[in-house]
Image (tube, rainbow, N blue to C red):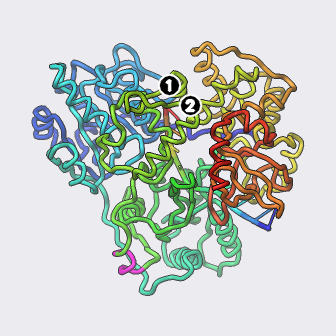
Amino acid sequence: MLPGSPAVPRRPPPPPAASQRRELPIFQARGPLLSQLRGLECAVLIGETGSGKTTQIPQYLYEAGIGRQGIIAVTQPRRVAAISLATRVSDEKRTELGKLVGYTVRFDDLTSDETRIKFLTDGMLLREAIGDPILRKYSVVILDEAHERTIHTDVLFGVVKAAQKKRKELGKLPLKVIVMSATMDVDQFSQYFNGAPVLYLEGRQHPIQVFYTKQPQSDYLQAALVSVFQIHQEAPSSQDILVFLTGQEEIEAMTKTCRDIAKHLPDGCPQMTVMPLYASLPYSQQLRVFQAAPKGCRKVILSTNIAETSITISGIKYVVDTGMVKAKKYNPEIGLEVLAVQRVSKAQAWQRTGRAGREDSGICYRLYTEDEFEKFDKMTVPEIQRCNLASVLLQLLALRIPNIVTFDFMSKPSPDAIQAAIEQLDLLGAVERKEDQLVLTPLGRKMAAFPLEPKFSKTILLSPKFHCTEEILTIVSLLSVDSVLYNPPARRDEVQSVRKKFISSEGDHLTLLNVYRAFKNVSGNKVGCSEDPRVSPLSLCLAAIQLSMPMESSRSDTANIRRCLAHSLFMNAAELQPDGTYSTVNSHQLVAIHPSSVLFHCKPSCVVYNGLLHTNKCYMRDLCVVDADWLYDAAPDYFRRKLRAAKN
DNA sequence: GAGCACTGC
């Protein structure tokens, strides 16, 4: 019921002595590697997992005096990785974390004037670039895990390339760029960085046998179940199994089925302990996958793609890959996110396979035929080509990029997606045309200061007008933490009944506010007491205070809060139709209230929502009941245009 | 009428 904890970094194993650092495969290559890197502006470094590249390269550079004039930055897609790597490297250097070696992630900065090796999230370096587009603090930027192609890494490619060029023109200290990746996309990286040399590092991956099915499988769940129990009957009980499935619902159902079957196994068959693993699972339950099963008992982990990259489990001998993943696509025409079960890419399949060979040789069962595999896409489509670009566009404009359409993307987003993002920012009042160039308005510049989606930044910035800044800050903070109302299928009734106590007939935003107020009372009035530091009310308050916003409370007047939401979410409005369905004001799309909404069983005549998600149906999520009049007041021009369009 | 991959600022 209450906020679940974030993935707190686990303390890494004790630092290896200098001799152990020398045993890493990469140590053999130290000399030649350094002499090459010393002379290069750009390099692409390819290394398997376990090569030690992420922990050692920054140290080698530092020890060899390369880049000592500035800071060596190492970016990571995930906070946990940035923090644990910094901890690891500072231990190896036998220094205190935050001195020579430090890290910066959102709301958590452990660096000092002495810091020379800095681990940070890719998004964080991008944010720093807004204040300093040529990254003058840094002498070296290492973009790690580049093959993951997160939207932030992709934008950083363009930013560091531009910074490098600019610094050269200005005759400043050169910026060295090192792209680190697993064995894919090599040519693309090298080409993009003007033919940068590719250096290969030996890994320490163990051999993995890969098996395909002989026939295509019509039911991958059934096939997975059969595989698990076949392995279970044949393999020694100390060898654990990791199964890749697509989502929470599916994983919970399969967990139950496996447990039921495991209860009725024939004599002589080992015990089995089945554990689900997905991101919205509370942290305490996620932790269970790291505990070794008792002797004579096999661990079977049923996971989403979270175990592909974010969570590494030791002791996995068998991987069962269904070849399916649930992933988001974005349709810019109607601003619709589609979440659908689809085939993985070849790269993803290899990533999954690799999870079987971390400590010893492994075995991977692919529940598809080799012919099917050959038809998979080579790479996963980069995130920048399948999501809403409003946030990124706002950041690029804050970076004063002269022209978004000609920005040097490694993989260009579609013109439609860029256009949709421009329109979205225009509706929010964040952009304007000046001398035929798109620039931020003063409001847009303030919006870029918040580490939030533009529509939520706008809501906060509007809140003083409605005298409800305190409430809006709370609501926006809670919206950004997905575990406030943790709701696993098994405990759904229980959660629903608890939530009933706090339900507001005015919608989900106000229900969240009620929950928070109740939580605050029982937990001793600590503002910002959310266990999840990612977006705490406190940290957003700080951002608001920096913009000198008055911290007013509307107290029991919820109409003002709803007015404020209507004024910032007017482009996400839907009206009840005579036939009982809902239709969006913007594109007359047929939509429904998501079952997780407190308004699911209600029929308010007019609502605004945070976003649409298409799964089996097109659902509105996070709704607030509003007056139709407020919408018109919020954006008269917009609604006049809509009316005209409707008449034509 | 009935359901939510994964990150990140």
Q: Chain of mark 1?
A: A
Q: Quadrant of the C terminus of chain A?
A: bottom right
Q: Which mark is residue A224?
A: none
Residue displayed at 79% across by 42% down: A628
Q: Position of residue A219 (x, y in %)?
A: 57, 80
Q: Position of residue A397 (x, y in %)?
A: 42, 31
Residue that badge 1 annotates: A441
Q: Which residues are magenta?
A: A369-374
Q: Nearer the viewer, residue A497 or A8?
A: A497
Q: Quadrant of the N terminus of chain A?
A: top right
Task: Report, in whole angstroms, how far the alpha carbon at label 2 lies from the one at label 1.
Answer: 7 Å
Instruction: Name the secondary structure under disc 1.
Output: loop
Q: Amino acid at mark 2?
A: Gly
Residue displayed at 75% across by 53% down: A596
- How many discs mark residues in the rendered view? 2
Q: Is residue A249 above or below residue A155?
A: below
* Residue A448 shown left or right of residue A465 in the figure: left
Q: Nearer the viewer, residue A178 or A257?
A: A178
- Please identify the residue farthest to the front as the structure is shown: A648
Q: Nearer the viewer, residue A162 or A360?
A: A162
Q: Amino acid at mark 1?
A: Thr
Marks 2 and 1 close (CB-CB < 8 Å): yes
Find out whether residue A202 is within the magenta segment.
no
Residue displayed at 38% across by 56% down: A358
Q: Chain of mark 2?
A: A
Residue that badge 2 annotates: A429
The majority secondary structure of the magenta stretch comes to: helix
